[in-house]
Structure formats: structure tokens, C-alpha cells
Image (spheres, coloured by chain):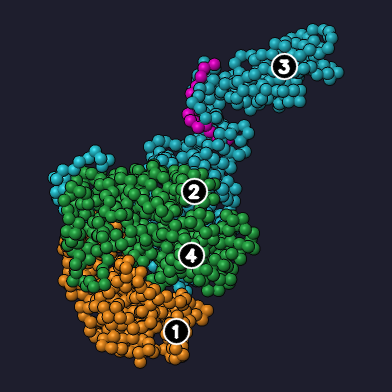
Amino acid sequence: MLVKVDNLQKRFELGRQQTLHAVDGVSLEIEANAIVGLVGESGSGKSTLGKSLIGLLDKSGGDVYFDGERLPDQYRATDFRRYGKEMQMIFQDPYASLNPRMTVEEILTEPLLLHSENRLSKQQRRELAAEWLTRVNLHPAHLGRYPHEFSGGQRQRIGIARALITEPRFVVCDEPISALDVSVQAQVVNLLGELQETMGLTLLFIAHDLSMVRYISDVMVVMYLGSVVEQGPADQVFFTPRHPYSQALTASNPLADPHQEKQRRHQLIQGEVPSPVNLPSGCRFAGRCSQVSERCHRERPALKPADGERLVACHLYG
Amino acid sequence: MNQPLRKTDREKALEVSNLHVEFDTYGGVVQAVRGVSFDVCRGETLAIVGESGCGKSVTMMSVMGLIPMPPGRIVAGTAKLNGREMLGLSTAALNKIRGAEIGMIFQDPMSALNPTMKVGEQIAETLMIHRGLSHREGLRKAVELLDRTKMPEAQKRTRQYPFEFSGGMLQRAVIAMSLACNPSVLIADEPTTALDVTIQNQVLELMREIQREEEMAIVLITHDLGVVARMADKVAVMYAGQVVESGEVDDIFYRSAHPYTLGLRSAMPSPEMHTDQKLSAIAGSPPDLFAPPAGCGYCSRCPDARNICETQEAGLIQMGENHYSRCWLQHAEANVDIAELYQHIHQLHGGG
Amino acid sequence: MMNAFRPTPQDFYPLIKQDEADVVVRPSLSYWQNAWRRLKRNRRALISLYIVVFLLLFSFAAPQVFEFDSQSQDLTQLSKTPGLERQSLVVDTAPWEGRFAAHPATDGPLQAVTDLQVIDVAHTEAVRLAWAPVAGASYYRVYRHILRPSGDKDLGLPLGETEYVDQVSFEDRLKLDTVKYYYSVQAVSKMGEVSPYTTVAVQPRHAISVRDAVARGLLEPEQLQQRIGTEVTLKRHLLGTDYLGRDMLARLVYGGQTSLLIGIVAPLLFVALGIVYGGLAGYLGGRIDELMMRFADFVIALPFLLFMILFRVAMGIGPGESGIVPMLLALVLLSWPAVARLVRGQMLQIREQPFVDAARLMGAGSGYLIFRHMLPNVMGVVLVSLTFSIPSAIFTEAFLSFIGMGVAPPTPSWGSMCNDGVKSFMSHPHELLFPAFMISITVLAFNLLGDGLRDALDARMKD
């Protein structure tokens, strides 16, 4: 087990006695070489979880272990220098994740400069950067260019090269394909899959496109309002969801198949996603659940094994 | 250009023919729309599918007269709304049509609503202008409309401001506004792209329901094939300013002919696939529309391009009763067996 | 069209494509190079840039090459209008005897003066007029106007009356300039009856008395007698002189030094201060940011003029002394908050950008983040702000010098020159117009340049 998350919490104080519980007690175990897909809608806390895990946000509670070692609660630059070599991140917005004033070469060699303790010469750094550009299917001649000269998909690939150039073991992918066109998404996903295989990476793939997450992940984790509601092998969670929310989510997931789409019973869940500020006691989904019971309002269900490797947080299952 | 046969039994709500739109920019003239034709009847949903830069939004904005005409220019084509030509109408005439006979909803509902006006007022405004209702009647109708869009506490909501609404509710309010005057056509430009998938579900279901009730035509612009599969009766696939394939929704999904359509479909993982099967990623990027290629726009990225594709633009070739594809591979002389071709391309794309 | 075209089997053979990875064709441009290109395309901004460069060269480079003397007073040419004429006539300034003529006997009502003419050459040392005697006149009145008279009430400056009996001449020595004058003469009878007036137009040429010429070193004393009636060449003043005879061009050049120095140095200082302050506030965020911004708000509220005067007093600078330092101090200490706010806003925005997170994740320290990642992205906005601060500072300095709170004579500055020029605006407008023009064009050029820079730098970088 490479990464272990134990009851992670992240709260934001909004002033006026209001607290936003972005991540409300999440526990997760990520095996080495696995791809864990994290899905959820807005307000689920999935992005916050990713950032807190990797140290960009200071967590409010809980522990995170990497390779058995406990990670700090608040990261300083020295902590990042230490762990940033092993744990990296790929960002969502290709237009804002690269410094517009730096050339591609500077962007790619920056991690080498900050980490490698000057073991590499400038020439060696440049060669490594060129090698990585080729690995992400870009031409090495692009080293001298600026981000604005590239398309969204190309920028995302540069971001991937930057994240992987120090050969980390664990990468959090925070919605890496949401801002891209469909055909470009495929390029990036293929690339990620390839690199994961050849480098033996462990990925936490955060997205809201269920089909894509199922395709790429071994394990799928569904979040709702800051907690995990279901977790298990990706195919199982996708085809036979147990938690009422996962069921609603899968039912809403559009399939590129007209016959199936038209035959489906589009089970609508009522209402909007409530705000993660001042959450109700009891199950967070109780207000919208079609199978709600009295107990649900009172008691918050814990994440328990349902069958096989499945974990569900619902009173219907224990 | 082959003039395709059209269904004449049902009333055509919107008929666009051979539309060409250009833009004057710093770098030259951009040919954004290069000969687009489609039509949609009442009670039908037409989906216009394409990725960014294909010209789908520009097409509809030109039809609505929403493109600023100094940099933009409609070079050719017609757009008939219920038989009446829309292109070239004066602003005054267009203003009468927009909102009344044609409704439009955009991707970002926040920008469709005036943040300083109460939602009820905005809906009532449409009615007051187009239907001549009084202020009170307008507000009453606004509550009715919001109710219809299944917005909870509609009465209370009419007195609130847009910032008090969530994304899904805003879109509902915008739909209510666009329906106020019972338009015959509703144009929805990526209406659910910014919404969560469960909310998207609700909004799409709502649109379907209203369509059934009002016999309204919907033109749905999207890049999401799942949404198309769910909502569309007819589909037009656009690439580099042209319609490359059009037909009934089953044609497009089960009998795709154009390599681009196939490419798009293969780029989405089907439920059985796993990472051992690569997604078909279409290499390269769309052509520069400053100097559109002489031949097929998709040629440089097509895995099965032929010599002729580079130099000659293909016309629309009929594949089925309403199914057309702009591809030389479908040409009689191409000597390609359709089934074989299908397989061949699928393999080339790396699909399973 | 499809009909005319018949494809052959070869047309359907597979197309062999060259392998092109995503090659981007255009040459690579950095942010600044791109911005420069955009700026060059903006004609107004380009012209403004040239003007700014010219002004800087004018004030700072020209004195190195040419000699400009802004202090010495050329008393031979006080308030001279701009022009190339430099010749002056040497004249003898002994008083004129005048002309006398017997008056004809009284015969009817008083007639207007006839035969009014200028005797000899009219020059700036004296204008001599003579006319024919009028019957019944007891004496004559002479007026001088710079405009053509339009009525009895509008004859101009009364120069005087003839003193002696039978005198039919007048010599005007009163502050003559090389402008067109209109002399009017009226005859007055013993009873006080006044005749209609007669006018003659006169344009005196520049003259210098023999004594003055010797005193100014333009003539040798021995040449006194011979040189009367000849010309001497005076010092060249291309743009004229002011009321004290100082060369306008030289004063504009040195005045430019003062005005531009303050106008550029002060903004540079307070922009630098603003960057540091705002950058820190924006980066640190939270409570510290709030406190720092509250202090900045407080500074904005302070009254500028009051503080400037306070500084002057504190430094013991009396009225009539040059107060460049208090002016600079006040400008710098009171103008930085606007820049600080701007920079802080930018920093807050940039702080949220993913590329900053990416750098943090790599282990970048605060200093590195600020200087390598955040500030370079702020620079565009700051540069624009700087270009707008400069005209503002120049204008402030001009205003302060104008009201006497800035530089004091003899130090020239465009503002103080305007102040001096106002006094003689009616008679010698060039003394005010030139410095005012310089200020205007400087302010305009910097403003347009700032506009152009903002357009060039702020645009979204999507080629």
C-alpha cells in the first residue's frame, strides 16, 4: 500500500460562525501501481481531497501516510522539496497551469533544478526535457516556445511531462481532461495510461466523467458532500452501484448509445446538491434519497464492506 | 452541391441552406462556416455535434443575427424560420422574432440573466414586450412558467435575484424565459455543459417534456455524444466549418460513415473497454480556417485518406434515406465495401 | 461541382502523408517581444514613444552637444518674440529737436490733422512723427495703440501732448517693441474743442543706442561716431527671450530637465515602493494583508499639498527657495498606495493560479515564488501604471511650481516658466505658450503611450 489516508478532514472557516466541511472524514488506501478513480459532483470535495493529500492545502485533521511515513500537517518548502519528488500533481486548467512567462524548457527543467541538488548539468537537463517532450508526443524543437503557442491538449501534455520528469511514484490527476475536447481527451488519457504502465505509477484520477473514470481506473471511489459513499472495483461500482447516490449518478451518466439511452428509466433525483456549509447530522444524502428511512436522518452511516471488495456508506447495507 | 431530399410531410420549423459566414480578423479572413445546411421540424430535436472551432456556435448565432456584422459577414445562404427568411432582416424585425418565435439558451446561464434584476421581472419583461401583457399579468405568467420547469417555490423564486440561484436552477429559469412566448424553435447552445451530471439529467428531461407538450423544435448544440444519443432525433456532425455527416440519430451512431464521426465515437470509452484497449485519439488538430484546405478538411488527420481527399472537396453523398456523408470513401468509384470500410477504419483507429 | 468531375481509380489510392508531429510554424516570441510587436502596430502609441524619446534627448542629451545658457540676461532683447532676426540698428539717442510750423489763421471749425508721417526710420529707441499744422489748433494730442483704433474712445494709450507753440512733431520713446503700432493725433483748440483723429501705422525696427552697444561689447568705443546708422548682430534667440532677457530655448531645455527628472524619478520611486508593499501584502494575505491595506487607505486620505508645505517648513526652506526635495518626498510618500493596491490585487489573483501551486509543489520557497513566478506576471500591469503616473507627476510639479511651491527662480522648470509667462501673456504670449505647450505634449505623449502599452500588454496571448 503506497498511500494511506486516515480520516482526512478539511474545513474552511467562512467567518460568521459558518464552516465549510469540504472533506469530512475520508479514509482511503491506495495500492502501489493502482489507478484510483475519484468521482463526484460539485461540492463533493474531491479536488480538495486531492490537494490536501498532496499538501497544497493544510489539512484540518486526519493523517496521510506515504510508503509508511506520516506526512506533515502543514507543508513548508522543505517538505515539498522532500516529498515533491515522489508525489506530484497534474492540474485541471491547461491555460493557467503553465507560467506564461517561461519557455517550455524552463518549465520542464524547473523541477530538476529544485530537486536534483545540482547533480545534472544544464546540458543534461535540457536533454532530459527534450526526451520528455518526445515522450508526450511533442516535438523537441518546442523547447524554446511559450505556452500560449500551444493548444489546450498540448499544454496539458507539457504539464504531464513536468509532473513526471522527476519520476515520482504517486500522481494526483485533478480533472486533467475536463477542459479538453473529446478527441483530445482520448489523447491525454491514452498517454496517461501508457506512462502509468511503463513507469509503474500510482494515480489518483479525479474527474466527473464516469465513463472515463471507469475506463482508466482499477478502483472507483464515489464522493458526496465531503465523504466517501461507495468504493470498490471500477467495473463493479459502475455496473452495479449499491449506494442510492451512486445509482443516481450512474443512471444520469449519458451513454453514446441511442437505444440504451432511450430505454433507460431516467431515475431523477430530486433537488439540488446542498451546500457543504453547515451540514445536517445524519446521512448527507438523506434529503434527496429515494430510499430514505428515519434512521438515515438520525445516524450517519459508516463506510462498511458490502460484498467482496465493496465498501458502502449506507444503512441499507449494514 | 447535391441538394438532399427532405421530408416534406411535417412542417419545417427551421431550415438553413448553404450558409457561409466569414470574419475579418487581424490575421486575415477566417471562413468560419463553409456551406452548412440542415433543417428541423416541429417536435423534433436536431443535435449539432462538433468540437471547439468547428463553427457550430457561429452557425446558430448567424441565424439569430447575433454575430456583429462588421467583423462578421454572411457571404451566402438562407435561413428560413417557419418559411420566413431570417438572414438580412433589420434589427427591429429580428427583435420581434427573437424571444417570441425563437428562444435561445446558452451555456452560461449567469450571463443570460441580468444580475441586477429579479428573475421574475426578467421573465415578465419578455412577455410584456412580445405579448403586450401588463406588468402584473407578466409576473403571474412568470410564476406559472417557473412552476412548469419544476422549480420548487416558484412564487418565492420570482422575487429573487440570479445570484441566489444555483447553476441548475438558473438554467431552468432561462428555459422558462425562453419558453415564455411559446417559440416554435428552441436553440440550446451547450445548455448542460457547465452543470453536474445529475442536474444535467433533470434539465434535459425538462426540455424533452416541454418539447412533447408544445411540439417545439429543438436545435441542440453540444460536443457530448451521450447527450446527443439521449435527446436527438436527427444529428449533424460538423468539422472545420462544414457538415461532414448528417442523418437520423441511429444512422450516426450505428451506421457512422464519416471517419471523423467514427473517430469521435471511438474516442469515448464504451462500457466494456479497459485501458488495454486504447481509445482512438485523433492525432493532430483542426485546420486553420484562414486558408481552408482545398480538399477535405479532415484529410490531414484521417487514417484512411486517399489521394483525392487532399485536392478535392467531397460533396454530400447519400447513404440512407436521410443519411448523408461528406466523404470520398462513400463515393461509388471508391470501390469500398461499407462493412469492410467500417471495420477497416475501426481497426486503424485502434478500436476493438 | 460534382457533375463535371469524374474521379479515376488512382484518386482513391491511399494518401501518403509526411509525418508531422505537432509542429508550430511561427517563430517563438516571448511575452515582451510579442507586446513590442503589438505596440509597434499601434500608430498613436508609436508616435507618442518617439515624442517621449525626443523629449528625453531634448532635455538631457542636447545640452551635452549644444551650448545652452539659461541664466544670463540679454538686456538688449527683453521679451523678444521668437524669430531669426538678429540685426539691430545702431542709433544716436540724443533727443530730437522736433518740427515747428506756423499755424494758419483761424478759419472755420477745427480740421483733422493731415500729412501725418514718420520721420526717418522708426526704431525701438524712438519713433518720430510730424504732421501739417491745423488752423485753430492750440496743441496736439498723440495716442498709441497696438490695434487699429475704432472710435474716439478707442485711440489707445495717450502718450502726451505737444509742449511748445507751433510744435507739429512728437518723439515716442516709451517702451517700443518691434510690433505694429497705430499712432493717432488729434488737434485741440484753445477752447478745448477736439478735432477728429488721424492715424498712421508704424512698425519700428530693432535699434540699440550707441552707448548700450558699447556697454554690451557689441561696438568698440572708438567706433562710436562711425557706426551710427549701421547694424550690429545680436545674440541669437530662436525661441525668443523672457521678460528678463533669458533665452527661452535654453530655459525650456533646463526646465525640461527639472520637470522630467521629477516626473520620472518620483514615479519610479513610488512604483517601486508600491510593488514591494503590495507584493508583500498580496502574497502574505489574510490578516497582515488587511492591516497593510488599511494603512494604505489611510495614506491615500492624506492631503498632498498640506504635506508638501509641511515638508518645506520642516526642511527650513523659505519662500522663494527651490523646494525640489520636499516635492519629491511628498510625491513619493503619498502616491504609492494606488500602485500597492494594484499590485496586491494582481498578486492575490496570481496566487490562485495553478502554475503557482505547481511551483510550490516542486519545493519553491516564498522568495523564489514571488520573484520568479508572481512578479513577472505583474510587471505588465505595473508598467502601464508607471506610464500613467509620469504625466501625473509632471503635471503636479508644474502646478506646484506655478503656484510658487516648487522650484524657485533662477532654476527653471516648465511650471515656473508658465507662472512667469502669465504676467506678460497679453503682450508677449510666447513666454507662456512655449512652456505650456511642452507640458501638454509631454503629458499627452505619456498618456497615449500608456494606453498603447496597456493594449499591447494586457491582451490575451492567443496570437
- What hue represents chain B? green
- Give the CA separation, mark 1 to mark 4: 33 Å
Mark 1 vs mark 4, foreground winner is 4
Specify whether disc 2 shares its chain with disc 1. no
Q: Quadrant of the C terminus of chain B?
A: bottom left
Residue A60 x/y as whole percent: 39, 82
Give the labeled residue for mark 3.
C198
User: Of circles 2 and 4, which is in front?
Assistant: 4
Residue at image mark 4: B213
Q: Nearer the viewer, mark 4 or mark 3?
A: 4
State which chain is coloured orange. Answer: A
Instruction: Identify the chain of the residue marked 2, using the numbered disc in the image.
Output: C
In this rendering, the answer to whether C119 lies above or below A13 is above
Local packing at callout 1 (Cα closer than 10 Å; few below 14, some 14-19, many 20+) is many
A256 vs B98: above or below: below
Where does the magenta region start and end? C229-244
- Marker disc for residue C391: 2
